Amino acid sequence: MSATLPDPSALVASLLNLMTRFSCLGCPNQAALIRRELALFQSYPDELMPPLLKQVGLRLEQEWAQLHFAISDDPVQSATHPVSLH
């Protein structure tokens, strides 16, 4: 595993937490962060992130991108400025 990628289980746990919090707050920055974390699924080798989970992650990434676009005041600017994981 790459030193720059988080543990796959930690990534999934983080996403579940972010998605739960988003359901309460509806924050555009959280939507952008969720989309970015879902995009990370594609960076893992198949032995660390099963292909089925990668497919689901790709579909969800696209859905969260649309949601972010719909709720953001300035979705173009938000998409060009990366959201920090911390």
Image: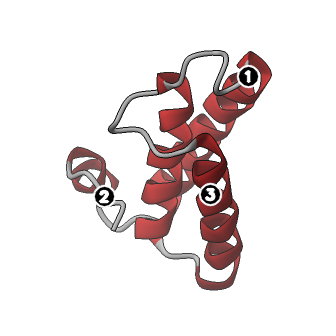
The disc, 3 or 2, on the residue closer to the chain's N-terminal end is 3
Q: Which residue is drawn at 72% across and 17% down?
A: 51
Taking the view exactly as shown, the residue that stands out farthest to the right is 52
Secondary structure under tag 1 reads: loop
Give me the C-alpha separation between circle 1 and circle 2: 26 Å
Q: Which residue is drawn at 66% across and 69% down?
A: 17
Secondary structure under tag 3 reads: helix
In the displayed structure image, the side of residue 79 where residue 77 appears, left or right: left
The image quadrant that residue 73 belongs to is bottom left
CB atoms of marks 3 and 2 within 8 Å: no
Q: Residue 30 carries which label?
A: none
Q: Which mark is residue 15?
A: 3
Q: Position of residue 49 (x, y in %)?
A: 66, 27
Give me the C-alpha separation between circle 3 and circle 2: 14 Å
Q: Residue at x 54, y 44 (%)?
A: 7
Mark 1 residue type: Pro
Secondary structure under tag 2 reads: loop
Q: Residue 50 carries which label?
A: 1
In the displayed structure image, the side of residue 43 where residue 18 appears, left or right: right
For the residue pair 68 and 22, the one nearer the viewer reads as 22
Mark 2 residue type: Val
Of discs 1 and 2, which sits in the foreground? 1
Pointer 1: residues within 10 angstroms few (<14), some, or many (20+)?
A: few
The disc, 3 or 1, on the residue closer to the chain's N-terminal end is 3
Pointer 3: residues within 10 angstroms few (<14), some, or many (20+)?
A: some
Query: Mark 2 — residue?
Result: 83
Q: Position of residue 38 (x, y in %)?
A: 56, 42
Relative vertical location of residue 55 with respect to residue 67 in this rendering, above or below: above
Q: Where is residue 83 in the image (x, y as percent from the top left)?
A: 30, 58
In the displayed structure image, the side of residue 1 where residue 49 appears, left or right: right
